[in-house]
Amino acid sequence: MPHDIDVVLVAPRYLAGPGDPAWVTVPLHRASGWSTAGDPLVPRVILTSPDQLAQLRITPDPDPAEPWWTLRHAHDGGQRAWSMAFDACTPVEIIAAVTDALTAPGPRPMAAGDPYEPLRAAGWHAPRHHDGHTSPQGMTAPDGLARVDATVHKDGRTASWIVETSVHDLPSIWRGYVDGDAPPHLVAALFGSLADTTPLVREPHRVPHLAASHGRTSPSRISAETFAFALERRTTALAKRRTPPPPPAGPSSPRMPKPRRPR
């Protein structure tokens, strides 16, 4: 008989904890054709895009502050090589926003707008220094628990972004590094996911302590089927992006009567 299971809805999402890495790796492999490689005796995952230009590497490290996730893309035409890296406690849904945008079919949007627009629309603001002035090179979440800092080249181009979630004077919960040469639509996808106010679903025993003490947690119940098949449904939906729609049906031609044989 179908039954419900207990879950916890966690907000803001950057406090939700890492989640299941399969949320990222399974769709890349099954829906987007990324190949797997690596030594089965080594706890490491390597996924490579079909065009061999992009690679996602997950390398567990005893130090949770060290990057576990590294996404690299080679130089391609007018696009410079770029990379992103994320710590172990980065919510997988935030990383998935980037990989989903990267693997979306169709032409890559290259127009560079305001990368902070998704954050600004969600109420993030420029950080304020001790002298009272705000910095144009970063954004801080309304609760002060997450921030994005930018470093710039002398010519004004962004050299990199650092995404950080931390609580007061405690060590960082997780950090992310984004190359300034990363395509604008991927940066927008990352920042949009950071600003998304939709709670993330976590099993009760996987809710971080800081999420309960500094975020908003709400117990809930969902069907066991919904929980068990969420990844499969996500993978199927992403695979359909690459399936071309059926050609439109043309106007039906009138049926001509068969000629009669002369008697």
Image: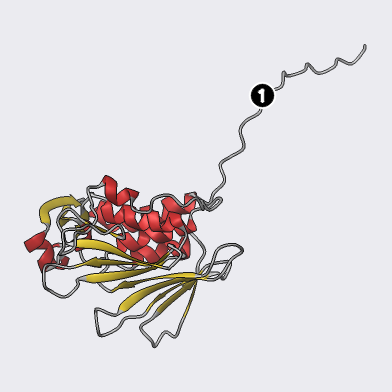
| Left or right: where 163 falls relative to 101 | left
- Above or below, 218 against 177 in this view is above
At which x and y percent is residue 128?
19, 59
| Left or right: where 261 falls relative to 222 | right
Which image quadrant for residue 253? top right
- Above or below, 169 against 15 in this view is below
| Left or right: where 219 falls relative to 36 | left
Residue extending furthest toward the bottom: 41
Residue extending furthest toward the top: 263
User: Which residue is found at the position 46% from the left and 52% from the top?
Assistant: 112
- Above or below, 260 against 79 in this view is above
Q: Nearer the viewer, residue 253 or 191?
A: 191
User: Which residue is found at the position 47% from the left and 69% from the top?
Assistant: 82
Residue extending furthest toward the right: 263
| Left or right: where 25 falls relative to 206 | right
At which x and y percent is residue 11?
17, 55
Number of dots carrying numbers: 1
In the rendered structure, which amino acid carries the disc numbered 1? Pro
Badge 1 density bin: few <14, some 14–19, many ≥20, Cα 10 Å: few
Which image quadrant for residue 216? bottom left
Residue extending furthest toward the left: 213
At which x and y percent is residue 65?
25, 78
Residue beneath disc 1: 251
The colour scheme used to paint the residues is: secondary structure
